[in-house]
Image (cartoon, rainbow, N blue to C red):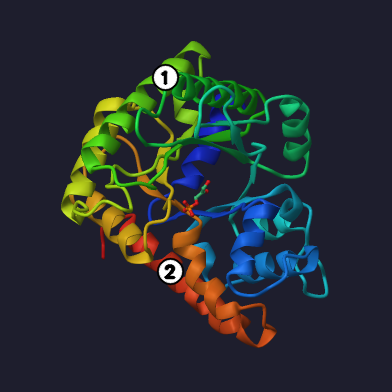
């Protein structure tokens, strides 16, 4: 099969109608923070057990098309007797295995409070290895912060450029890149400011993707929604978020993208599903599928039930499937 057909095949599985992506790719430090909040030590074994609980939840294959993993998880196995490597286990359930390949957002030298995502050095070799281990898609997250006088053009451009170089290397290796430019929700800013920054970011991103001849049908865009800052006193309502987000995407994104899958970015469970639902309910004529690729908005309530206890696994898994089912319904506007 030619590389473009392979990319299209994977991308269309990832955004299949009624399904979305589970982001379970927290780095060890981020997983440590999540575990600290429930009083669980972030050990190799506990992380393995937690990811096993997520991926083993009943019926998730009905709502989840793909799972993004962190390097450690990608090499770990189910905890049952037959110990199946997670990529293989997911594939056997019809879920596409994916891998986070960036090395995290680091301080951008010369620009206070801004970040640049690292990880391009040696990426080609890492991608080849992940493909051999069963990965079909990758993720790279760029972070854009809103505050007084920022984001700077330097921050937007350097992150967009890195995303394009990453995407190009992924496609070279028949891996679908999830291209994630996250405009952070943190702050007092209005939804209008978020709209302006998101538009500037997407404009620059697609200029860079164009420059690198990225095959758009073979990427999944993972944007943040156009939304008020979390500390804004008059946060915009669901209708406004849905309408402004869709307008922004329609105006800034090419029509032939493989698909769009939002991050939840610190929205509550309720917000993340109602925004997605409204977008899909009111727009049956979008050029691309608009679905979810949530981490916290799918996992958080299950994590809070689990609290590291084997006796809570079943209940936590029920919660996880329940959240995935709601997100799935929202991805077709059926809530
Ligand atoms: P959240 O849904 O918790 O924002 O995480 C999505 C993600 O993958 C961040 O990179």
Establish if 333 lies above or below 53: above
Find residue 273 and report its horizontal and vertical position in percent: 33, 60
Q: To which quarter of the image does residue 271 belong?
A: bottom left
> Any atom of ligand 1 within 8 Å of the CB at mark 1?
no
Instruction: Return the disc, 1 or 2, that comes first in the chain's sequence.
Output: 1
Find residue 142 and report its horizontal and vertical position in percent: 52, 34
One can see residue 243 in this view: yes
Q: Name which residue lies at 62% across and 52% down.
A: 25
Q: Name which residue lies at 55% across and 32% down.
A: 7
Graded by Cα atoms within 10 Å as few (under 14), some (14 to 19) or many (20 or more), the crowding at tag 2 reads many
Q: Answer left or right for 240 relative to 28.
A: left
Instruction: Using the image as rendered, state which of residue 112 and residue 54 is in the foreground.
Output: 112
Instruction: Using the image as rendered, state which of residue 311 and residue 21 is in the foreground.
Output: 311
Quadrant of the rendering where the N terminus is positioned: top right
Establish if 128 lies above or below 18: above
Establish if 302 lies above or below 191: below
- Between circles 1 and 2, the one closer to the viewer is 1
Find residue 166 and report its horizontal and vertical position in percent: 60, 26
Find residue 236 and report its horizontal and vertical position in percent: 19, 51
Quadrant of the rendering where the C terminus is positioned: bottom left
Establish if 237 lies above or below 298: above
Secondary element type, mark 1: helix
Q: Which residue is mark 2?
A: 323
Q: Which residue is mark 1?
A: 153
């Amino acid at each position: 099969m030619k590389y473009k057909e392979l990319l299209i095949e994977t991308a269309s599985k990832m955004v299949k109608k009624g399904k979305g992506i589970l982001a379970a790719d927290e780095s060890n430090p981020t997983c440590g923070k999540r575990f600290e909040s429930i009083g669980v030590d972030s050990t190799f074994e506990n992380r393995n057990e937690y990811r096993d609980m997520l991926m083993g939840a009943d019926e998730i294959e009905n709502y989840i098309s793909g799972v993004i993993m962190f390097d450690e998880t990608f090499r770990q196995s189910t905890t049952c007797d037959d110990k199946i490597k997670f990529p293989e286990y997911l594939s056997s359930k019809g879920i596409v295995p994916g891998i986070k390949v960036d090395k995290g957002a680091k301080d951008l030298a010369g620009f206070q409070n801004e970040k640049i995502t690292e990880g391009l050095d040696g990426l080609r070799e890492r991608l080849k290895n992940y493909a051999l281990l069963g990965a079909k898609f990758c993720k790279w997250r760029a972070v854009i912060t809103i505050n007084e006088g920022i984001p700077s053009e330097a921050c937007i451009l350097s992150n967009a450029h890195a995303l394009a170089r990453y995407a190009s290397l992924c496609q070279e290796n028949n891996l679908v890149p999830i291209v994630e430019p996250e405009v952070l929700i943190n702050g007092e800013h209005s939804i209008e400011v978020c709209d302006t920054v998101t538009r500037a970011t997407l404009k620059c991103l697609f200029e860079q993707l164009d420059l690198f001849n990225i095959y758009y049908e073979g990427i999944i865009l993972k944007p943040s929604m156009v939304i008020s800052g979390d500390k804004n006193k008059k946060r915009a309502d669901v209708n406004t978020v849905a309408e402004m987000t869709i307008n922004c995407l329609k105006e800034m994104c090419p029509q032939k993208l493989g698909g769009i899958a939002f991050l939840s970015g610190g929205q509550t469970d309720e917000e993340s599903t109602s925004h997605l639902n409204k977008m899909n309910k009111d727009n049956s004529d979008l050029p691309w599928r608009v679905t979810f690729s949530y981490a916290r908005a799918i996992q958080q309530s299950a994590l809070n039930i689990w609290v590291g206890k084997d006796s809570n696994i079943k209940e936590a898994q029920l919660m996880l499937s329940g959240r995935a089912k709601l997100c799935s319904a929202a991805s077709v506007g059926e809530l």
